[in-house]
């Protein structure tokens, strides 16, 4: 049997991984829910968030300023991408947005390689403290990521359920034309959603930067996992995204404890099984509107 | 009975002039002409590819031909059935490893190896197809990528005892020279790849004009109507899925034979979008799009990485540009021009009809 200490640290590792997955995929899921686009460029904002954090931390030595910078960079890029590209493709087929956003992702990675170079860069750990849980030493930073993810989920839930803009977004997820008929500027909602999504992806990159070394391909490496999370949770469902993020995080982390190659394969096997039972994921709606 | 007679006679009257015209001496010549025209497109395309050999080093041209075949499957799925697959490397790897296992463990004949690669492609496509094609379009794209990752790690780690993991399998020396065209010789392999490509394009051109091709288009545009006519959209999609992925597996096995080496990197998820990019660059759904796309893609990769060192930037920018500029791609926007030119030339021969360039 596996050592208890290993198991505890594995669970915490999985949770922090799930937190990162959640922050990236929540943007993807929101964009799909409201605009019916698959925005793979969220992975670019994730990478850029990581790189901006790296630059700010090495320049100023202040890790939290770096995180804020990464988040801001993600938001600005999300805004630009929405205004310049996505505005023109909302009424097209879903494959269209997928290919276009993939183009943005690949082009953006090219820019990253141009600006920061090909070498992987380490980012210093903002909280080098270790917490004692049941006799196992856990880096406090990982717990912080989990807390941030849960806070973001709560924040988005409050935003969607308690503010008028959030309610309009939820109504838009149900039926965009009705919302438009009520006299609400739908395109402003789209922009707001995109900026939120970009900021959260940037935040994910900023938080993930100290855990991994930032390198240009980090977005591509994460891509398969984000795909999987949104498939398991069901595209467009916030709750599904949260559940499946932590599920996938645990499967990756605990799977690798039992048998190393499982780390990458087990989540995909889980996904295939879930798709066999429910073709639209755990919480996805069965019909694709529009 | 009596009431039905007038339309029948009217129809007969309408049809009557046609056989009369067909019996006129122009007919055999025009028929030969139209057959010639039908074959001229693919033949011209591959003649031009062969000509490319004079200007470009051989490995690059072979890569172009194999990538064309690779992208042809993706092109068929995206352009004709409307299914976007980010997981073509999975089937590429299946074809490559099917061939590699045969050639590494005992086999020596490259032809048999390629056949085994194709068979492996068909088997895997039939295995996963029924599960995949009933998914929604967006899930379909994602699930294929998932399969790519599974197969990648299967080859890299789980089956490492048989695949030698990241080191790959080298079987260049184990292949014996084959009769007719010696596949171990790059020059003759090039001719072989041209022939295979030509055959494949004739096949896809035939599919375009067949009832099955029409069904595929219907599955892309309006599957409800397809079902209404009496076709099963599941069967049509499954057949298209198997055809497309077998094509991809063929490209994989050709890669294996050409390189004499297979490693998991060949079907790695980081290259998942290559065929999609080629398809979009060339023009999704056009017959010659994959060829034009792979020339553009590989040419750019080669040139830009020599001069600029950073070709992803260009590819990504171009992809966004092509999509925003109307999704037609290079060949998609060139083809109508050629068609007009062709029609003007053909007008003197008084043969109506159109070039196969555009679908």
Image: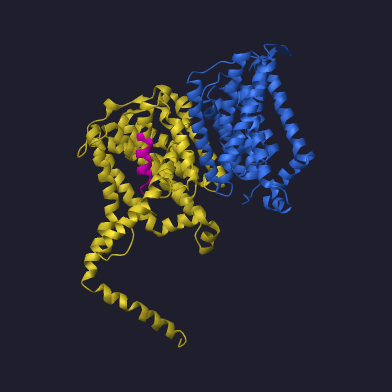
Chain colours: A blue, B yellow
Q: Name the side, left or right, on which B173 lies relative to A249.
A: left
Screen quadrant of the N terminus of chain A: top right
User: Percent from the top left, x then y, of residue B58?
Assistant: 26, 33
In the image, what residue occupies the spot 24% across and 69% down? B27
* Secondary structure character of the magenta stretch overall: helix
User: Percent from the top left, x then y, of residue B107?
Assistant: 30, 32
In reply to whether residue B295 is colored magenta, the answer given is yes
Instruction: Examine the image and state in which quarter residue A14 appears.
Output: top right
Q: Pick whichever, A190 or B157, lies toward us.
A: A190
The residue furthest right is: A162
User: Percent from the top left, x then y, of residue A8?
Assistant: 68, 18
In the image, what residue occupies the spot 35% across and 36% down? B253
In the image, what residue occupies the spot 50% across and 37% down? A103
Q: Name the side, left or right, on which A282 lies relative to B69.
A: right
Q: Name the side, left or right, on which B229 lies relative to A246.
A: left
User: Percent from the top left, x then y, of residue A185?
Assistant: 70, 47
Residue A284 can be seen in this image: no
Which region is colored magenta? B287-299
The residue furthest bottom is: B2
Residue B282 can be seen in this image: yes
Q: Name the side, left or right, on which A254 lies relative to B213.
A: right
Q: Pick whichever, B240 or A255, lies toward us.
A: B240
In reply to whether residue B139 is colored magenta, the answer given is no
């Amino acid at each position: 049997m596996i050592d208890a200490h290993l198991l505890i640290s594995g669970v915490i590792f999985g949770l922090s991984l799930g937190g990162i997955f959640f922050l990236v995929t929540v943007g993807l899921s929101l964009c799909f829910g409201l605009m019916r686009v698959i925005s793979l460029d969220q992975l670019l904002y994730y990478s850029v968030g990581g790189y901006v954090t790296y630059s700010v931390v090495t320049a100023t030595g202040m890790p939290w300023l770096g995180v804020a910078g990464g988040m801001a960079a993600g938001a600005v890029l999300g805004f630009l991408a929405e205004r310049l590209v996505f505005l023109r493709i909302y009424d097209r087929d879903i494959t269209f947005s997928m290919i276009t956003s993939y183009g943005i992702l690949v082009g953006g990675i090219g820019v990253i390689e141009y600006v920061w170079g090909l070498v992987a860069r380490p980012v210093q750990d903002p909280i080098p403290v270790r917490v004692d849980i049941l006799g196992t030493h856990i880096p406090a930073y990982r717990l912080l990521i989990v807390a941030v993810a849960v806070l973001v989920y709560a924040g988005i839930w409050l935003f969607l359920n308690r503010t008028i803009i959030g309610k309009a977004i939820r109504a838009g997820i149900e039926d965009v034309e009705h919302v438009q008929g009520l006299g609400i500027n739908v395109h402003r909602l789209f922009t707001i959603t995109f900026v939120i999504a970009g900021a959260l992806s940037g935040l994910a990159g900023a938080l993930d930067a100290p855990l991994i070394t930032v390198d240009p391909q980090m977005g591509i490496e994460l891509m398969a996992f984000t795909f999987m999370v949104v498939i398991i949770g069901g595209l467009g469902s916030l709750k599904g995204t949260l559940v499946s993020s932590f599920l996938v995080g645990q499967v990756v982390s605990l799977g690798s404890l039992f048998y190393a190659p499982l780390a990458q394969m087990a989540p995909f096997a889980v996904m295939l099984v879930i798709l066999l039972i429910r073709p639209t994921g755990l919480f996805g709606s069965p019909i694709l509107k529009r | 009975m009596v009431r039905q007679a007038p339309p029948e006679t009217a129809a007969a009257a309408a049809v009557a002039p046609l056989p009369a015209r067909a019996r006129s001496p122009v007919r055999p010549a025009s028929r030969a002409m139209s057959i010639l025209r039908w074959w001229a497109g693919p033949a011209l395309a591959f003649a031009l590819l062969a000509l490319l050999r004079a200007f470009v080093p051989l490995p690059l041209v072979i890569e172009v031909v194999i990538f064309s075949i690779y992208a042809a499957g993706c092109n068929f799925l995206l352009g004709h059935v409307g299914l976007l697959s980010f997981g073509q490397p999975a089937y590429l790897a299946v074809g490559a490893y099917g061939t590699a296992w045969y050639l590494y463990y005992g086999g020596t004949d490259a032809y048999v190896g390629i056949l085994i690669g194709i068979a492996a492609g068909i088997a895997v496509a039939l295995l996963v197809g029924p599960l995949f094609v009933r998914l929604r379009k967006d899930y379909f794209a994602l699930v294929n990528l998932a399969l790519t990752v599974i197969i990648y790690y299967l080859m890299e780690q789980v089956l490492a005892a048989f695949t030698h993991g990241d080191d790959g399998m080298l079987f260049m020396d184990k292949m014996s020279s084959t009769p007719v065209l010696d596949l171990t010789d790059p020059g003759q392999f090039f001719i072989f790849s041209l022939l295979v490509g030509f055959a494949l394009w004739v096949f896809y051109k035939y599919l375009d004009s067949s009832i099955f091709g029409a069904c595929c288009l219907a599955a892309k545009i309006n599957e409800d109507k397809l079902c209404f006519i009496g076709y099963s959209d599941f069967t049509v999609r499954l057949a298209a899925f198997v055809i497309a992925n077998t094509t991809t597996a063929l490209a994989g096995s050709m890669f294996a034979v050409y390189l004499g080496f297979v490693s998991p990197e060949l079907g790695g998820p980081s290259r998942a979008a290559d065929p999609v990019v080629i398809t979009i660059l060339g023009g999704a759904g056009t017959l010659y799009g994959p060829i034009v796309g792979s020339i553009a893609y590989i040419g750019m990769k080669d040139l830009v990485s020599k001069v600029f060192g950073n070709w992803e930037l260009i590819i990504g920018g171009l992809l966004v540009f092509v999509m925003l500029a109307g999704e037609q791609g290079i060949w998609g926007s060139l083809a109508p021009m050629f068609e007009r030119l062709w029609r003007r030339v053909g007008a003197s021969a008084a043969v109506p009809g159109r070039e196969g360039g555009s679908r």
